[in-house]
Image (tube, coloured by chain):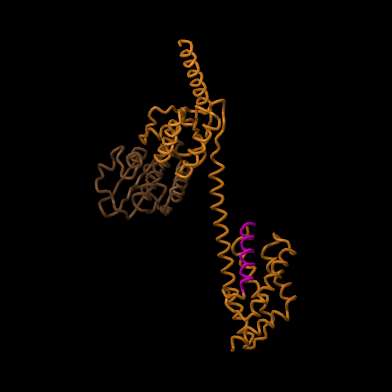
C-alpha cells in the first residue's frame, strides 16, 4: 500500500481463551496509539474478539498479527487472523447472519465485517482461513 | 571404587571447613539478595542445607534423586516456594545453591582428587539448582491459578439494591466460567432476598461480543424461569453502537443506560404489580 512504512508486526498465539484475551488487550492498545475514537476502539476490539475466537473454535488455533497502518494520511490498525484449520467451504453461507455450526449466535464473522472498515476473507475447504481487517481513524 | 574416594574427599572437605564455608556462603548469597532477607534467617536456611548436603554425601549418594538427598530436596523445595512467594526472581532463588561452588573453589588444592570432588559437587549442585527452578515455577503457577480463582470469586458479588431488587455489577471479561458463577449467584440471591427484580450491570465490561451477549441472554432466561424480571444496565454509547453493528438483538429484555435508570424501572415494575394485585383484590 502506498505510504505504508515498515512497521513492527506483533504476533499472538491463539491457542485458547487466554489467547483471545491477550489479543483483545493488544488490539485495544494499538487502537489507542492509532488515535481511534472510543467507539471505533470498541468496535475493533469486539471484531478482533470475534475473529480470534473463531480462529480458536473453528480453526483449531492459529495466530493473530497486528500492526499499525497508514494510508492517505490516516492512521489505523491492521489485523490478520490465520489458522491452518479445515477452512470455510461456503463463504456466502458463513457470512449470513445467524448461521452457525458451533452453537454461537452466528454473528461473529458477519458482525466483524460490519465492525471493520476493510474486510478480506481468504479461505477454502482444506486450506485454512485468513481474515484481514483494517479500522481507520476518522 | 574411585567414585567412592571422590565422594570421600568431598565429605572431608565439607566437614573440615564447615564454619568457613557456611559463613562465606551466607555472605555470597546475602549479597545477591541485597538485604531483602535477614542474615539470621538466611544463615539458618543455608546451615540446614549444608547439613543435609553433608549427610547425603556421607550416605554415599552422588546423584540428587538418590534417597540420601531426600532431605535436601525437600528443604530446597520449601526454600524455592518461600522465595517465589516473597517475590524473589528465579536467579535469586537458584543462587542459593550455585553460590556454594564459588565458596568451595579457593579451598581446592588442584590435586586430581580435589578436581574430581569438585566436578562431582558441581554436577550435584547443578541438579539441585534445576530442582529449585522447577519448584519455583510450580509455586508461581499455583499462585497464578489461585489468584484467578480469587478473581472469579471477588468480581461477581450480587447485592441487594432495594426491597425485592438485586443487582450484579459485572467487571472484566465474561467467559463461560464467570457466567456460570454469575448465574448461580444471581439465582440464589433471587431466592435469598425474596426478589422479583434482577439488574445485570455491565458498566465494567470493556467489550460486549457475541459470546458475552449469549452468556448474558442465558442468564436472563434462567432468571425469568424463576419468575424474576431482568434488566441489563450500564450500556455505554460505544457498547450500544457495537452491539447494533454486530447485529445482536436483546429481544424484549429491557436495557438501560445507567444502574439508576434500571433501579427506577425495577421499582416502577414492583409498584405496578402491587397495584394490579390490589385492583384484582378489590374486584373480587
- Please state the horizontal and vertical placement of residue A85, each as a whole percent of the image: 32, 54
User: In percent of the image, x 54 and y 52: which residue is there?
Assistant: B145
Q: Colour of chain B?
A: orange
- Please state the horizontal and vertical placement of residue A27, each as a whole percent of the image: 44, 46
Left or right: residue B93 versus residue A51 is right
Left or right: residue A115 versus residue B136 is left
User: In percent of the image, x 72 and y 63: which residue is there?
Assistant: B41
Q: Quadrant of residue B136?
A: bottom right
Q: Magenta stretch containing residue B261, yes or no?
A: no
Q: Quadrant of residue B77?
A: bottom right
**Looking at this view, is B187 or B125 the one in front?**
B187
**Looking at this view, is B274 or A25 the one in front?**
B274
Q: Is residue B51 above or below residue A29?
A: below
Please identify the residue farthest to the front as the structure is shown.
Answer: B284
Q: Is residue B113 above or below residue A107?
A: below
**Which segment is the magenta one?**
B69-86
Q: Colour of chain A?
A: brown
User: In percent of the image, x 37 and y 44: which residue is there?
Assistant: A134
Q: Is residue A9 above or below residue B255?
A: below
**Looking at this view, is B36 or A106 the one in front?**
A106
Q: Magenta stretch containing residue B84, yes or no?
A: yes
* Quarter placement of the N terminus of chain B: bottom right
- Please state the horizontal and vertical placement of residue B51, each as a whole percent of the image: 69, 73
Please identify the residue farthest to the top as the structure is shown.
Answer: B283
- Please state the horizontal and vertical placement of residue A115, each as a whole percent of the image: 37, 38
Mainly helix, strand or loop, the magenta region? Answer: helix
Amino acid at each position: 500500500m502506498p505510504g505504508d512504512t515498515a512497521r513492527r508486526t506483533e504476533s499472538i498465539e491463539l491457542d485458547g481463551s487466554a489467547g483471545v484475551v491477550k489479543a483483545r488487550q493488544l488490539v485495544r492498545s494499538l487502537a489507542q496509539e492509532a488515535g481511534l475514537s472510543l467507539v471505533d476502539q470498541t468496535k475493533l476490539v469486539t471484531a478482533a474478539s470475534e475473529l480470534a475466537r473463531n480462529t480458536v473454535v473453528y480453526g483449531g488455533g492459529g495466530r493473530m498479527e497486528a500492526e499499525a497502518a497508514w494510508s492517505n494520511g490516516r492512521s489505523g490498525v491492521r489485523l490478520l487472523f490465520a489458522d491452518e484449520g479445515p477452512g470455510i467451504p461456503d463463504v456466502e453461507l458463513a457470512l449470513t447472519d445467524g448461521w452457525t455450526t458451533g452453537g454461537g449466535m452466528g454473528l461473529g464473522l458477519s458482525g466483524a465485517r460490519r465492525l471493520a472498515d476493510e474486510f478480506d476473507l481468504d479461505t477454502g475447504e482444506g486450506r485454512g482461513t485468513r481474515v484481514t481487517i483494517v479500522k481507520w481513524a476518522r | 571404587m574411585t567414585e567412592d574416594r571422590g565422594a570421600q574427599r568431598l565429605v572431608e572437605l565439607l566437614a573440615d571447613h564447615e564454619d568457613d564455608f557456611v559463613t562465606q556462603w551466607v555472605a555470597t548469597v546475602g549479597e545477591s539478595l541485597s538485604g531483602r532477607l535477614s542474615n539470621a534467617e538466611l544463615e539458618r536456611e543455608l546451615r540446614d542445607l549444608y547439613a543435609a548436603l553433608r549427610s547425603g554425601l556421607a550416605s554415599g549418594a552422588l546423584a540428587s534423586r538418590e534417597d540420601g538427598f531426600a532431605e535436601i530436596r525437600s528443604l530446597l523445595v520449601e526454600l524455592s516456594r518461600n522465595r517465589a512467594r516473597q517475590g524473589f526472581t528465579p536467579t535469586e532463588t537458584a543462587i542459593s545453591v550455585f553460590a556454594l561452588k564459588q565458596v568451595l573453589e579457593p579451598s581446592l588444592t588442584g590435586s586430581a582428587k580435589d578436581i574430581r570432588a569438585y566436578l562431582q559437587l558441581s554436577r550435584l549442585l547443578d541438579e539441585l539448582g534445576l530442582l529449585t527452578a522447577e519448584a519455583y515455577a510450580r509455586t508461581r503457577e499455583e499462585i497464578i491459578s489461585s489468584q484467578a480463582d480469587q478473581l472469579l470469586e471477588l468480581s461477581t458479588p450480587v447485592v441487594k439494591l432495594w426491597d425485592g431488587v438485586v443487582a450484579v455489577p459485572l467487571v472484566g471479561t465474561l467467559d463461560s466460567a464467570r457466567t456460570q458463577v454469575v448465574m448461580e449467584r444471581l439465582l440464589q440471591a433471587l431466592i435469598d432476598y425474596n426478589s422479583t427484580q434482577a439488574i445485570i450491570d455491565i458498566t465494567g465490561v470493556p467489550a460486549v461480543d457475541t459470546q458475552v451477549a449469549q452468556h448474558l441472554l442465558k442468564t436472563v432466561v434462567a432468571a425469568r424461569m424463576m419468575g424474576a424480571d431482568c434488566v441489563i444496565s450500564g450500556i455505554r454509547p460505544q457498547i450500544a453502537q457495537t452491539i447494533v453493528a454486530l447485529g445482536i438483538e436483546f429481544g424484549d429484555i429491557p436495557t438501560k443506560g445507567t444502574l439508576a435508570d434500571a433501579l427506577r424501572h425495577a421499582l416502577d415494575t414492583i409498584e405496578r404489580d402491587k397495584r394490579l394485585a390490589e385492583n384484582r383484590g378489590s374486584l373480587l
